[in-house]
Image: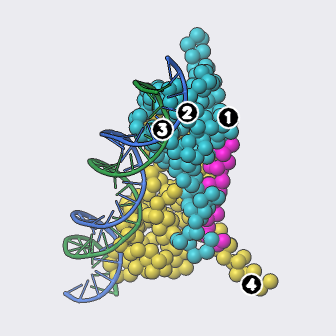
Chain colours: A yellow, B cyan, C blue, D green
Amino acid sequence: MLSQKTRYALKALTLLSDYQKEYDKPMSILELAEQGRLPQKFLEAILLELKNNGILQSKKGKGGGYFLGRPADGIMIGDVVRILEGPLALLPCVSQKFYKRCDNCISEETCGLHVLFKEVRDSTATILDSTSLEKICSVQDQLEKSKSHMYFI
Amino acid sequence: MLSQKTRYALKALTLLSDYQKEYDKPMSILELAEQGRLPQKFLEAILLELKNNGILQSKKGKGGGYFLGRPADGIMIGDVVRILEGPLALLPCVSQKFYKRCDNCISEETCGLHVLFKEVRDSTATILDSTSLEKICSVQDQLEKSKSHMYFI
DNA sequence: TAATATCCTATCAACTTAGTAGGGTTCTAA
DNA sequence: TTAGAACCCTACTAAGTTGATAGGATATTA
């Protein structure tokens, strides 16, 4: 399961993305915390981490705040999850970006579990690395529209 | 990532399955611990948990030990992982067997992340719930054979 | 230069993980 | 029937992670 931290991060990113689209200016931590009902100080740490990893940029001083480090369609959910959670893989020996030899099996090439969990990690990575923040926001937008439309039927 | 506990469990199960096929009798904790280089007392707790969840059965007294609770082709890796790790899903709100409402999003039907992580959980579950212990062992067997064959080329 | 906002360090309680220790209970083979 | 093998159970522990909070230092800009 994803940690609370990662969930906060993903929520904050969607809020930031929407905000930026509408107002085209940085969003302060306080605004983000209030809009998303996120613990302010904890959020602060999360945003900083995302910034240090290139997902976000910040502007200090009056009128400052955080904004996306690159266009929303270039921010993949897989990247965000990896920054905050580490590997997507369920075993270190099947991770692409955080590979570590497996101490449990005798030999990687003949380990049946290795084959299985490689398959799992690949399917997960394929999905998360091909889905951008932009996509999430637009899907959400679509869903909200079609939901509110239902009231008129 | 899977916990060490789960990894030990999976390894123990493959060993048990192989042993049973060859000798058709229970395998003692001590034998398992030695063969798999697993910490004995920790393994003990793991086997007990698997037994309490129907994956294993045990026989007490001299000549006793653990054996599979049902045929190896009926023990799905997904089941084992769920017993030891809880949900396969990355978010509680997309779990089938451990569903919990999501406190982070306002509405589940309009949450873009919900849709995405549902897709991830489904692909993971499909793989892990369709792969049996028997499959793992036979794949491993195949791989070992083809590896040892290579020395003769 | 004062207000604003990020940045940084330290601290914390609660929980989880990966075990270990030690004995109690139950079964069964001899 | 009884000794020993093996399971079963409770308690404990050290180390690490999680989900925060507090307080101030630093940078920016109106």
Mark earlier in primary sequence (1, 3)? 3
> Amino acid under label 1?
Pro
Report the Cα–Cα distance between label 4 and label 2: 62 Å
Q: Can you identify the residue that label 3 sits on?
A: B8
Report the Cα–Cα distance between label 1 and label 2: 17 Å
User: At x 40% / y 70%, what residue is drawn?
Assistant: A43
User: At x 74% / y 84%, what residue is drawn?
Assistant: A151
Q: Position of residue A91 (x, y in %)?
A: 50, 42
1 or 4: mark nearer the eye: 1
Q: Position of residue A60 (x, y in %)?
A: 34, 74
The chain that hosts pointer 2 is B
Label 3 secondary element: helix
Q: Is residue B124 above or below residue B69?
A: below
The chain that hosts pointer 4 is A
The chain that hosts pointer 1 is B
> Amino acid under label 4?
Tyr
Magenta-drawn segment: B109-130
Q: Position of residue D19 (x, y in %)?
A: 41, 66
Q: Can you identify the residue that label 4 sits on?
A: A151
1 or 2: mark nearer the eye: 2
Q: Can you identify the residue that label 1 sits on?
A: B71
User: At x 44% / y 64%, what residue is drawn?
Assistant: A5
Q: Main secondary structure of the magenta part?
A: helix
